[in-house]
Amino acid sequence: MVELSFHQEINQELQLMLSPKLLAMLRILALPYVEIITEIEKASEENPLVEIQSNEKLMEYLEYLGSNKKIRKQVDFDEYPGLENIKNTPKKLKAFLLDQLNLIDLDDNKFDIGREIIEEIDDRGYIKNYNEVRDKIVKDFNVSFHVVDEVLKVIQTFEPEGVGARDFKECLLLQVQNFGFESDKLQKLIEKVIKNHLEEISKNNVSKVAEILSISQEGVSQVMDFIKKNLNPNPGLNFGDEAQRVIPSFSIEVTEKGEEVKLVNLEKEYGPKINISEEYQKMLKDSKTDKETVKFLKDKLEKAKELIENLRKRGETSQSIMNIIIEVQKGFFKKGAQMLLPLAQKDLAERLGLHPSTISRALSGKYVQTPKGLVPLSFLCQRELSGFSPMAIKGKIIEIVKNEDKKNPLSDKEILETLKKHFVVVGRRTVASYRKQLGILSADERISL
């Protein structure tokens, strides 16, 4: 009876969570900016009721990003807030991964190991012959297998999702783990299908998988559809042989004195807008229009409205998330990675009254142009936190010493007590070690200055 209830629950969750409308909404939420533009263009070609409102600024900007910079001579993007600092710089996969590695606070040894691992990642995003690669790194760096595996796990959290996988199944599983399902049972079911039943899925053997998992054939079909439409078996190929041009969704500007941080929503400012064709709406209401055409137009109207609503939700969610990121990470935008503060996706979800899965999707594949370079939003709002990063603690120590009474400098113990007031709990030895790494003299030495 308990077993039957469990499978009934799973079937209900499959119908709810993997419904075409919900998946369409989650897909729009998760798409990077450049793919949203492609999605809208595709919709306008396939649906006569979808009209794209012309945006000359966007077209000029996209031309510039895809050009050899000649258009820069004709178009002054300095006139457009948020666009002036974005460079026409294509990104190859390995360079893109190295950029993200530079944002992580690793010791020198682990950082160098990370670079070695990234060098072994192929164009598809996989790391082939990992055991051989690991053996070489263990020998070259005189570290344990565990240390190398630990660094690989860090790289596997980078964009694009699924990168750094050792095989096809791991690539899909990494993406499932990052998808952010509302139901743990549903996630485990999909993971089980990927681990044990991909061969049956490739043969479209729905009934066999349904029997093994004790779920409906419709449920298996929904899982198969989810895997095909939402998981990318070759995450690195989006970067191509040439390079991938990453278009940020937001731009951050910091005033010259570093006092104010200004946010520009590039999607809202310059992104394409959609209208529903008035001409076809009139045709739909016209009594002379034949039934078959009316049916066709009604279907297209519903799809157009659904797309517009999904884009609206995407815009509102992204803006709300970014507002909080700006509030929390202002120090990062002003001074750099040493000022990065912990911000968990679940905490953000609670503040906005959303499910963590929605936050996860909204952050996926999105970037913000900052004075420090292009940064993935997921770096600024992490899935899980292990406390304050060493960079953030060092940043706090710099700030505390900068604001101390110069005639009565703070001892390491007093710095420690001040850190506790900011909810940063570390040991006294750690404070002393970080202070020395930062080149800050002891209290006695500072007072003599």
Image (tube, rainbow, N blue to C red):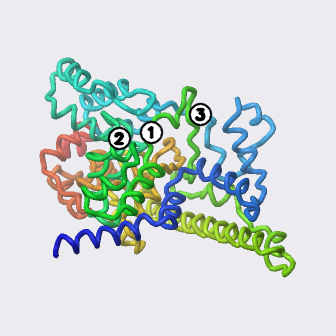
Q: Which residue is mark 1?
A: 235
**In the foreground, 284 or 436:** 284
Say what secondary structure mark 3 lies in: loop
> Looking at the rendering, which quadrant does residue 346 occupy?
bottom left
Left or right of 347? Residue 433 is left
Looking at the image, tell me whether mark 1 or mark 3 is earlier in sequence order: 3
Between circles 3 and 2, the one closer to the viewer is 2
**In the foreground, 206 or 359:** 206
Say what secondary structure mark 2 lies in: helix
Q: Are marks 2 and 1 in contact (CB under 8 Å)?
A: yes
**In the foreground, 151 or 369:** 151
> Distance from label 2 to label 1 (Cα)?
8 Å
Give me the residue at 18% from left, 33% from top. Answer: 147
The amino acid beneath tag 3 is Thr
Q: Is residue 174 above or below residue 54?
A: above
Residue 73 appears in the figure: yes
Q: Which mark is residue 171?
A: 2
Looking at the image, tell me whether mark 2 or mark 1 is earlier in sequence order: 2
Residue density around tag 3, few if under 14, some if 14–19, many if 20 or more, within 10 Å? some
Left or right of 94? Residue 439 is left
Q: Which mark is residue 89?
A: 3
Q: Are marks 3 and 2 in contact (CB under 8 Å)?
A: no
Residue 328 locus on image (x, y percent): 40, 61
> Distance from label 3 to label 2 (Cα)?
28 Å
> Distance from label 1 to label 3 (Cα)?
20 Å
